Amino acid sequence: MPTREQDRILVTGAAGQIGTELVLALRERFPAGNVVAMYRSTPLAPEVAAGGPSAVSDVTDAKGYAQVVAEHDIDTVYHLAAILSVGGEQDPKKCWEVNVGGLLTVLEVAHERQQRLFCPSSIAVFGPNTPAVAPQETPLHPTTMYGVTKVAGEILCDYWFQRYGVDVRGVRYPGLISWKAPPGGGTTDYAIAIFHAALRDGSYECFVSPATRLPMMYMDDAIRGTLGLMNAPFKALNHHADFNLGAMSFKASDLADAIAQRVPGFTCSYAPDARQAIANSWPDAVDDSAARDEWGWSPRFGLEEMVDDMLENLRHGLGTE
Ligand code: NAD
Ligand code: SER
């Protein structure tokens, strides 16, 4: 069942890269007072804080989370609170506690209160043995703790659907590129930092090699895909929380070249660090035919369109237009 006008919506991780934009998008589509932005320690963006209700809670605190949900009488949850790939390698145990322990709490409450749930996965579920274009169905053997938690999360979501009938949906987002909120400590963050450095310094030292190719997506497409999946008729879905979602695939040097064409004098150098090994373990691109067939997914932004839009928005923000 699609989200109804009167439904009350909770977004966890609402101070994050995706949460910031998802809350704003939901408040455009539904009554702003019905969209609750939940965050932990990172403060909400000012427009998110000012535009509707918010709550402070930690998803590893089951009691506190259940209280927030009860207090706001929540019908639908977009569960975005997580530790990403780089943070996960720094503290694997915490990554498990937040990404799997937190999800368990959210799933249990969703079952008790018959909520609808969106829980994203990631290209990090794939590993070094995944084909270059990751199929929808393929053995999942990630080599990062973040990837391990995302595989576990997909399986938990499927279990809650099969055992309890919870309407839980999710996509394997590629690396997401955006300008409204900073990224939260992932391997694909280079593809955002490069824009800021290009406009600020005219140069960037990239932490992955020029030949590193990864699946990527502009945030506008990610938000549209998220809302599109949540709006799809449940009966049309054969998959639930593990849809591959594709948009573009480029090498780090392709991105640097596209920026150099638009920022005169921009240069990019390369100094791969520990994040290179993480990037090497992920595929180049994904086969998203299941998302296209089951709920009509189709991206709008390729590399050129994304670079134009990023630069326009960042220049506008810097007052250099
Ligand atoms: P982010 O790091 O920008 O935001 C996550 C937020 O969760 C942060 O504000 C953080 O403070 C909060 N958080 C962390 N631990 C918490 C806890 N215990 N309790 C409550 N809040 C907590 O991440 P994002 O990029 O917005 O990602 C959101 C979701 O999308 C995650 O599940 C992530 O794995 C997934 N994803 C993101 C990308 C990407 O490129 N951004 C790609 C694939 C998947
Ligand atoms: N963008 C995320 C990361 O790099 C992928 O899930 O961690």
Image (cartoon, rainbow, N blue to C red):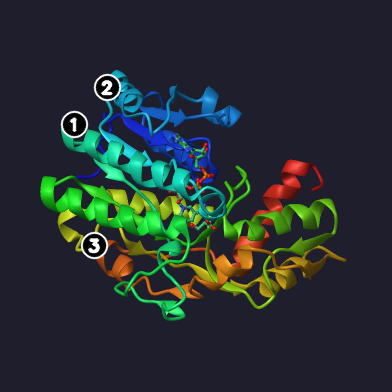
* CB within 8 Å, label 2 to label 3: no
What amino acid type should be assigned to the residue bearing mark 3?
His
Residue 135, quarter of the rendered image: bottom left
Q: Is 249 left or right of 198, judged from the image as shown?
A: left
Q: Quick one: label 2, few (<14), some, or many (20+) residues within 10 Å?
A: few
Mark carried by residue 239: 3
Pointer 2: what residue?
70
What amino acid type should be assigned to the residue bearing mark 2?
Ala
Q: Quick one: label 3, few (<14), some, or many (20+) residues within 10 Å?
A: some
Residue 257 vs residue 301, the one in the foreground: 257
Residue 108, quarter of the rendered image: top left
Label whose residue precedes the other's in the sequence (2 or 1): 2
Q: Quick one: label 1, few (<14), some, or many (20+) residues within 10 Å?
A: some
Q: Is residue 43 above or below residue 86?
A: above
Q: Is residue 56 above or below residue 157?
A: above
Q: Residue furthest bottom?
A: 131
* CB within 8 Å, label 2 to label 1: no
Residue 304: give x, y in percent of width and height: 63, 68
Q: Secondary structure at mark 3?
A: loop
How many discs mark residues in the rendered view? 3
Which residue appears at 39% of the width and 59% of the height? Answer: 148
Q: Secondary structure at mark 1?
A: helix
Q: Is residue 116 at all visible to an observer of this figure? A: yes
Residue 252: give x, y in percent of width and height: 66, 71
Mark carried by residue 274: none
Image quadrant holding the N terminus, namely: top left
- Determine the CA span between mark 2 and mark 1: 9 Å
Q: Is 164 left or right of 139, judged from the image as shown?
A: left
Pointer 1: what residue?
113
